[in-house]
Image (spheres, coloured by chain):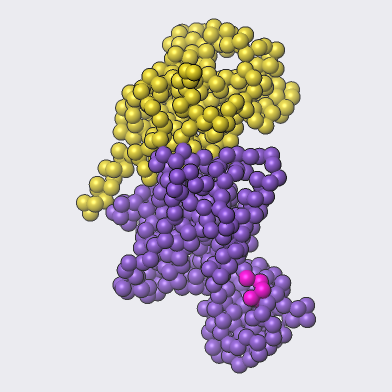
Amino acid sequence: MERILVSGNEAIVYGAIDAGCNFYAGYPITPSSEIMHLMASLLPRHNGVFIQAEDELAAINMVVGASWAGARAMTATSGPGFSLMQEGLGYAVMTETPLVLVNVMRAGPATGQATKPGQGDVMQARWGRHGDQYIPVIAPLNPQEAYDYTVWGFNVAEELRTPVVVAIDEFIGHGREVVFRKRGVERVYRRKPSGREPSFGSDDPRIAPPMPILGEGYYVLVTGSTHNEYGYRDVHSFETHYKLVTRLKEKIWGNMDKLFKYRVYGEPGSASKAIVCYGSTCRSALEAWSKVKEDTLLVRLVTLWPIDYVLLRKLLASVEKVVVPELNLGQVIYDVMACVDTSVEVVGLNKIGGGIPIYPSEVIKALKG
Amino acid sequence: MVKHPSLKYMREEVLPTAFCPGCYNGIIMNALFHAFQELGIEDLRRFVFVSGIGCSSWIPSPYIKADSLHTLHGRAIAVASGVKTFNPDLEVIVIGGDGDLLAIGGNHLLHAARRNMDLIVILVNNQVYAMTRGQMAPTTPYGFKTPTTPYGNPEEPFDSVKLLLATNANYVARWCVSNYIQLKNSFIDALSKIRRGFRFIEVYAPCITYVVRREGKSAGEKLMELRRKCIPYKKYMELQEDERRDYIPVGVYRCEDKPGYIDRYREYVGKAMER
């Protein structure tokens, strides 16, 4: 165990290196660039490959290529770059390519305010690609969690053969705190196929099929088009498409217990008021909750996707009022609305731009108001 | 029964190919397999083929028996760069069309060539977007009628070789499908003579369905015409400006053995380790 004082962005790099990351391709963008800077410095010294791509489209696709060549690969970006990477993310979902994508959220849309925090990419992280596709999204709230969940992200990506999005915002990315860096971090590796075992199909959809590494004689066919369990393109039949895409969904939603992480403060079942929060906003919300506590519940969504709606509904069963603080104009509030009765008052506490946080006093006011 | 020597490089179970009758993709495939054969390559287990979206992207996926990545439209070179930089022992070959590599993927082509990335890139120039029914592409000649240029293409086409010569690419060549032997020899150059850096081979292969047939010609007639039209680029340069319109310059424009990206990156890692 080593104590380091680092920003969230740097913590992510140390988490990645400790998780065995050995490939990074990226394109500079505020406020995520420190991730790229530190990777550029560390990877060549850690037997890894660092490449500055010509744009984010190239970056994500280089990561996909490296992952198939056997790398534990990642990239990092922010709003506009995240938009460009959606195409590659969709390809990674369809081809079941493990990778980690860090999105340091800033105030959008478009170029927006590059140096200011935001939480406006929640829906984009979930639904930014076309077609039916699902990607785990995790939202740490401080540099330590940024470190821990980057490690977690690599392991989930490898185990489930899926891209994983780690979503922090500028507050966490640039905020410096003490991080405990672990020695001998547990690493999960993808399973290679034995013999002619199919690499795009499995009997149990919750288990990812084995993944060959290029150049080892498997003669793998990788395609973003609909394919059967051996990778052969089938762009006509209903059965192949249905089987593939429902399996890809089940691989994520069927692993809810593994993927859905949350924290509860207070007494579910009796509290009449609740705060539902995620990411940096939780820091203010927790401060507010510690001052109110009585009759108040705080549910922190660590995982932003997939969401266990049944569980969330149970947690919020007794409440009459829910406050949802977000650094956007309301995105997770719709999850909350879906999980409470129409009689429950759901209040959004929203701020955007200017780098101004939601203050604990405002959360308390919203709870009381 | 004696098997065709090319079959060992192919996935027999997916034959016949989906290409239109008379499609020149077969000539390119055969020239490539011929090159493998002459070099004594028995199987393609150390080869990775990367392609994007388009008719020529179907050459490797699924027909070539090697690891192949059939990627997004335009992104083949980016994916290939990721594969090659992570595992330089693999021979990575990109096969793509003019729309794929020059339009939607133009930026990746330019920057991979600038880096002298250790890839072999085969650009199959069929002059249109054939898979989507023959719309105007960045290589469509001025005045040519397509579904998106019904009154004749108002734009000038790219000359991919001129573009590539402005970069650090080690090897730049253009051949036509009518130059079978020279094309095969260029593949041999790229596979054995120049073993590093960016090796770019444009193959001029007009789409049989949306170019040749629109001109009212058969595949054979067009090939005979191309045999006459494709002339060595030095001869082409001697022609008057107005005579050039009827000819296509071909040949090996550049053949150098400068260090590629992989060499440079190894050097860079050396510097990193000294610090």
Callout count:
0
Query: Would residue B116 be visible to someone looking at this image?
Result: no
Position above or below: A245 against A147: above
Q: Residue at x 56, y 31 (%)?
A: B13
Position above or below: A215 against B11: below
Q: Residue at x 29, y 54 (%)?
A: A45
The image quadrant that residue A252 belongs to is bottom right
Magenta stretch bounds: A308-312
- Which quarter of the rendered picture does the C terminus of chain B lie within? bottom left
What secondary structure prevails in the magenta region? Answer: helix
Position above or below: B171 against A309: above
The percent position of residue A161, horizontal first and vertical second, equals 50, 55
Outermost residue toward the bottom? A294
Outermost residue toward the front? B1
Out of A169 and B99, give the one closest to the viewer: B99
Q: Residue at x 57, y 55 (%)?
A: A203
Query: Would residue A180 be visible to someone looking at this image?
Result: yes
Q: Colour of chain A?
A: purple
In this picture, residue A38 sits left or right of residue A342: left
Chain displayed in yellow: B
The percent position of residue A297, horizontal first and vertical second, equals 61, 85
Out of B140 and B206, give the one closest to the viewer: B206
Q: Residue at x 55, y 48 (%)?
A: A200
The percent position of residue A38, horizontal first and vertical second, equals 36, 58
The image quadrant that residue A247 belongs to is bottom right
